[in-house]
Image: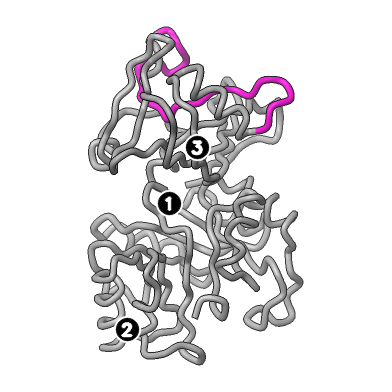
Amino acid sequence: MFESMPNTGPEIQVACALIWRDGQILLSRRHQSAHQGGLWEFPGGKFETGEDPKTCLTRELEEELGIIPRNTYFMFQIPWDYGDKLIRLWVYEVVAFDGEPQGLEGQDVNWFSTDALRTLQIPKANDAIVRAIGLARVLRIYDPSLAHEPAVWATKTEYQCLLYFRGLSAGVQLETAVDAALTHGHQVILTLDQLPYFRAGCGVHLRKTDRVSDALTHLGKLNKPWPITAGIRDEKDIDRQRGWPFDALLISPVLETPSHQGMQALGWERFSELAGKVGVPAYALGGITHDDLFTVTEHAGFGAAGIRGFQ
């Protein structure tokens, strides 16, 4: 979810990490005397003068935990207003590191399963990080005019994807495709009219044409839908959907594409600007292929989404 944030006052820049080992995530506990003392948090700290986010993260993890990250991937930014201070979290995922983590500054550190982590008391600004745990980096969008049988299309890739069966009417084909996708280890998002086929492990994609009251009513009846997504193009879309419980957003069209004919491409710099405002993982959509994933993360994005480039 992204929150309203006034455009006044300097932001405190902070880098933090979701650190993985053997399916568990490392957290540290804030000292009782610190701001929001006693809460568990993702390790990291404030930028020093002249530092970029990744340099800051590397330094902080070595100083606080005694580890040196080896494989680090950008996730997203979180602009947040705590009332007494404005911060911007630069969130990374660390999947390999050297050293054995320990609390070098006297703080408690511990490894948690993803289920246990979700029961902890954490700073409000970290909620979006918890919701992003395990989210697939690639979002494939089904197109009936291009794709194979939906169930076959859903199982074409070996790597985990988030699948959006756009344009597929409710019926046996959709039901079979959803079951095939989940069995294959993929994540699925459904539109409101597809919810009769909602299963555990499915999320919901909200469209601009969906009424807010209807959408929230439907979401309230579902058993932990995840992820909840939507598409945006500009700040008006961000403002219109502010306060909705989104876990990720699709920003489009980044590049020129036949599926967005007549719409001016945003370009990478504009994509980066928007991605930095939403406070949740941002997928780049429009002329994007799997090969663009590195470029996406270099421009404040989380993942690559596409239709033609992912069939």
Q: Position of residue 300 (x, y in %)?
A: 62, 48
Give the Cα distance between marks 1 and 2: 29 Å
- Residue 172: quadrant of the picture: bottom left
Q: Amino acid at mark 3?
A: Arg
Give the Cα distance between marks 1 and 3: 33 Å
Q: Residue at x 23, y 63 (%)?
A: 200
Q: Which mark identifies residue 70?
A: 3
Q: Main secondary structure of the magenta part?
A: loop
Q: Could you tell which of marks 2 and 3 lies nearer the N-terminus?
A: 3
Q: Position of residue 298 (x, y in %)?
A: 65, 50
Is 103 magenta? The answer is no
Please give the residue where the numbered disc 1 appears in the rendered image.
245
Q: Position of residue 193 (x, y in %)?
A: 36, 77
At mark 3, the secondary structure is strand
Q: Which mark identifies residue 151?
A: 2
Question: Which residues, given as a range, are shown in magenta?
Answer: 33-52
Q: Residue at x 68, y 78 (%)?
A: 257
Residue nearest the viewer, comparing 87 with 241:
87
Q: Mark 1: few, some, or many residues within 10 Å (few <14, many ≥20)?
A: some
Q: Position of residue 145 (x, y in %)?
A: 50, 92
Is 39 magenta? The answer is yes
- Residue 195: quadrant of the picture: bottom left
Q: Amino acid at mark 2?
A: Ala
At mark 1, the secondary structure is loop
Q: Residue at x 39, y 65 (%)?
A: 159
Q: Mark 3: few, some, or many residues within 10 Å (few <14, many ≥20)?
A: few
Q: Is residue 152 above or below residue 245?
A: below
Q: Could you tell which of marks 1 and 3 lies nearer the N-terminus?
A: 3
Give the Cα distance between marks 2 and 3: 38 Å
Q: Is residue 198 left or right of residue 89?
A: left
